[in-house]
Image: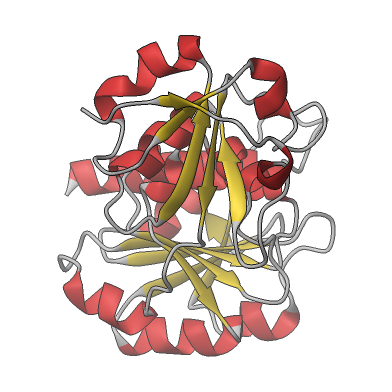
Amino acid sequence: MARHRRARAWDDRRSAAPGTYWLYGTHPARAALRNPRRSILRGSITETAWRELERDWREGLDPQIIPAEKVGQMVPPGAVHQGVALLCEPLPPVDLGQLIEAGTPRQRRIAVLDQVSDPHNEGAILRSAAAFGLAAVVVQDRHSPPESGVLAKAASGALDLIPRVSVVNIARALEELGRFGIWRVALASDGSEDLHDAIGDSDVALVMGAEGSGLRRLVRERCDTSAFIPMPGGEMQSLNVSNAAAIAFYETARARQRH
């Protein structure tokens, strides 16, 4: 087990160097420490948090034991850091084609996010995707939140559990998914069929649009069908994208169990 020491120079730990960021919170930190693909440069932690995370601490990473207020100086104001902050490099990129080829046929379920820009929404989607066993979450590089402590905290560890594939063009990514035989379903309130019926028992990509504006026309045209989530309540005909995603992922999990 790594030995720990008291950190001395606070000032040089308050801000991350370019290309790095502070990841914070118990669940994100534990997932990052366990992820062999994650490069961690520094770890600052309180005595209390150390007792919780000591077993998961990475060999060779010197934990700097500091007061909670010093941890708070490394993260965004008001962030719930739970006494731990890890200075990290972004995760290495994931190639979409290689990921699909490595998957098991008829069990490849993927979420595609078309310009979902809120890190809290995407984090919640990543968390649901990990919970329901999706293979990956695809995002567009220019219109999605950057990898950050905020995103990692919202994902509650899922950022290090499920591949997040960043692509230049969502429409072209959907074309690539189609060439691999993956059924592409656009989620929309005016969809042509019930989500339950649209999924079937094949590999599926669930395509979800941005908050407010929904799916772009070219993205929707690259899908094989469109589907809606039945809402028998009547008074409310739309959901937050992260809530809709959780329902859709649950339906895909049920479909896989049925078949």
Scheme of image coloration: secondary structure
Q: Quadrant of the N terminus?
A: top left
Residue 98 falls in image quadrant: bottom left
Point out residue 30 in the picture as x, y percentages from the top left corner.
Answer: 38, 32
Question: Along the horizontal axis of the image, is 182 left or right of 73?
Answer: left
**Residue in the picture at 48% in, 25% down:** 26
Which residue is found at the position 15% from the left and 65% from the top? 104
- Left/right of residue 201 with respect to residue 63 in the rendered view: left
Q: Residue 148: where, in percent of width, then height?
A: 63, 52
Q: Is residue 159 visible?
A: no
- Above or below, 35 against 30 in this view is below
Q: Is residue 241 left or right of residue 229?
A: right
Q: Quadrant of residue 115?
A: bottom right
Looking at the rendered structure, the number of numbered marks drawn on it comes to 0
Residue 225 picture location, percent across and down? 52, 72
The residue sitting at 56% across, 44% down in the picture is 152
Q: Nearer the viewer, residue 144 or 66?
A: 66
Q: Is 2 rendered above or below residue 212? A: above
Compared across the picture, whether 238 is left or right of 200 comes to right
Q: Please say whether residue 204 is visible from this viewpoint.
A: yes
- Residue 176 place in picture, x, y as percent: 41, 88
In the depicted view, which residue is nearer to us: 82 or 111?
Answer: 82
